[in-house]
């Protein structure tokens, strides 16, 4: 299978590489500055402790989502290397160019994406 027609693969690849680099820099910066919240009830009030726990959970979820996006980007770059970029990974039909322009890492056409959700 070759890459879908009417796509500027080089431009898509550049966007993917730029976004991956940006995400990896953010992930690295967060790892360097991350400090575990002090959850000692003797030192902080119950509400402040709850806020700290909630903030920590939100930071963990944000980190998980960033890592998930990096994985999606890596998979899209792999599809480019294998000359499968632009085709749905489920039905193997071409993905609409506008959909890829919006999210070059998407592995699914709109029909298959609708069935998954």
Image: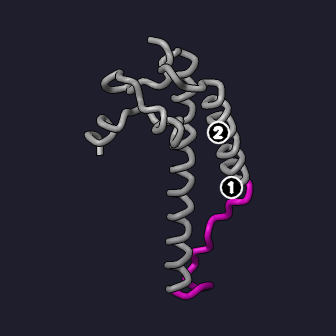
Q: Is residue 38 above or below residue 31?
A: below
| Image-based side of 52 in relation to 29, left or right | left
| Image-based side of 43 in relation to 28, left or right | left
Q: Quarter-wise, where is residue 22 in the image? A: top right
Along the viewing direction, whichever of 34 and 95 lies nearer the viewer: 95
Q: Residue at x 73, y 53 (%)?
A: 29
Q: What predominant SS class does the magenta segment belong to?
A: loop
**Residue that lies at the very extreme toward the left in this rendered image:** 115
Q: Is residue 14 magenta?
A: no
Q: Which residue is mark 1?
A: 30
Crowding near the residue tagged with mark 1, few <14, some 14–19, many ≥20 C-alpha atoms within 10 Å: few
Q: Residue at x 64, y 39 (%)?
A: 20
Along the viewing direction, whichever of 44 and 115 lies nearer the viewer: 115
The numbered disc on residue 6 is none
Q: Is residue 94 above or below residue 110?
A: above
Q: CA distance from mark 2 to mark 1?
A: 15 Å
Q: Position of residue 102 (x, y in %)?
A: 51, 42
Q: Which residues are magenta?
A: 32-46
């Amino acid at each position: 299978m070759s890459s879908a027609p009417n796509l500027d693969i080089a431009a898509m690849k550049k966007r993917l590489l730029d976004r991956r680099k940006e995400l990896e820099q953010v992930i690295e910066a967060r790892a360097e500055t991350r400090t575990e919240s002090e959850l000692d009830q003797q030192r902080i009030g119950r509400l402040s402790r709850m806020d700290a726990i909630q903030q920590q959970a939100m930071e963990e979820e944000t980190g998980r989502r960033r890592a998930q996006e990096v994985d999606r980007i890596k998979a899209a770059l792999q599809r480019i290397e294998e000359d499968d970029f632009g085709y749905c990974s489920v039905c193997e039909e071409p993905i609409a160019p506008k959909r890829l322009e919006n999210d070059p890492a998407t592995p699914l056409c709109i029909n298959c994406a609708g069935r998954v959700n």
